[in-house]
Each structure stands twice: as C-alpha cells, then as structure tokens.
Image (cartoon, rainbow, N blue to C red):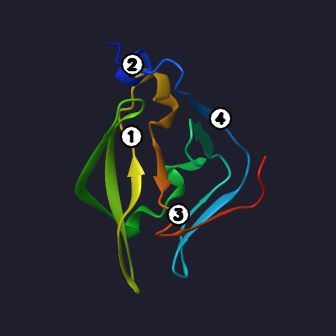
Amino acid sequence: MPNPAPGFEQHPNYSVVIEPSSTRVRVHAGEVLVADSTTPLKLSESNLPQVWYLPLADVDQSLLERTDTSTYCPFKGRASYWSIRTNAGVTEDAIWAYEKPFDECAPLAGYVAFYPNKVRIHPDAQD
C-alpha cells in the first residue's frame, strides 16, 4: 500500500538524499561503545546537518530502552525514540528511528540515528 510523504507535495524543492556508505561509524555513550557499523546510511536534508543512520543490528540493543517519545516529520514519517542505559547512567531519548518511513525514505527502515549532543559519533572518514 503506497505511503507517500505529504511534505514533498507541499514543498517540492525540499531535498532528502539517502546514500549507502562504507564509512565505519562508531557511537559511544560516555566510554561505552553503543554502535559500530560499516554499512551506515548518510542522510543529507535541505538546510540541515548530515545525519548518519546505522543498522539497528549494529547497535548494542541490550543498552536500549524504548521511550514514549514520538515526533513527526512530513518528509520521513513518525519517529520512535530510545534512551541508552549504561553503568554511568541514562542518556534520555538519544536515538531515533523511522520504523515505518514514508515511501520516499523507505531505506531508513531498520536504521537508527543518534543525537550528536548526547553521544559521540565517530565516522572514520568522510566519503
């Protein structure tokens, strides 16, 4: 069943570009390695900083706690959130994902992104 993003109809010049990458991206919460991926997606969106999306399979899911937080993007869809729990404490709503993204952003399904002001994101090299 088609699930088009309403935002592109209202803003036809808006751009969301999703590209596969071979850049190794690691994510730390404090000293704890939360994610390590060599198959991230690089998302570039009009007037916003680039965002790395990592496969959920490359995240230590034992550290994640789903929260009730939800946001909506007219281009990507509804986002779900997770906090990260380590021995050092809880980093609230540090991760988001579009579990059922709009058609134009379908590659994001199964991937998560991290807030750079809540964790350290380390791409080995920009491609």
Residue 53, percent from left and from top: 54, 47
Residue 21, percent from left and from top: 70, 42
N-terminal-most mark, 1 or 3: 1
Badge number at residue 50: none
Badge 1 amino acid: Tyr
Badge number at residue 98: 1
Q: Nearer the viewer, mark 4 or mark 2?
A: 2
Spatial distance from mark 4 to mark 2, Cα to Cα?
A: 24 Å
Residue 33, percent from left and from top: 55, 72
Q: Nearer the viewer, mark 1 or mark 3?
A: 3
Badge 4 amino acid: Glu
The foreground one among 42 and 40 is: 42
Q: Nearer the viewer, mark 1 or mark 2?
A: 2
Spatial distance from mark 1 to mark 3, Cα to Cα?
A: 18 Å
Spatial distance from mark 4 to mark 3, Cα to Cα?
A: 19 Å
N-terminal-most mark, 4 or 3: 4
Callouts 4 and 3 close, C-beta under 8 Å: no
Local secondary structure at mark 4 = strand
Local secondary structure at mark 1 = loop
Residue with the mark numbered 3:
116
Local secondary structure at mark 3 = loop
Badge 2 amino acid: Gln
Spatial distance from mark 4 to mark 1, Cα to Cα?
A: 16 Å
N-terminal-most mark, 4 or 2: 2
Badge number at residue 19: 4
Badge 4 density bin: few <14, some 14–19, many ≥20, Cα 10 Å:
few
Callouts 4 and 1 close, C-beta under 8 Å: no
Furthest residue toward bottom: 88
Badge 3 amino acid: Pro
Q: Nearer the viewer, mark 4 or mark 3?
A: 3
22 in relation to 75, above or below: below
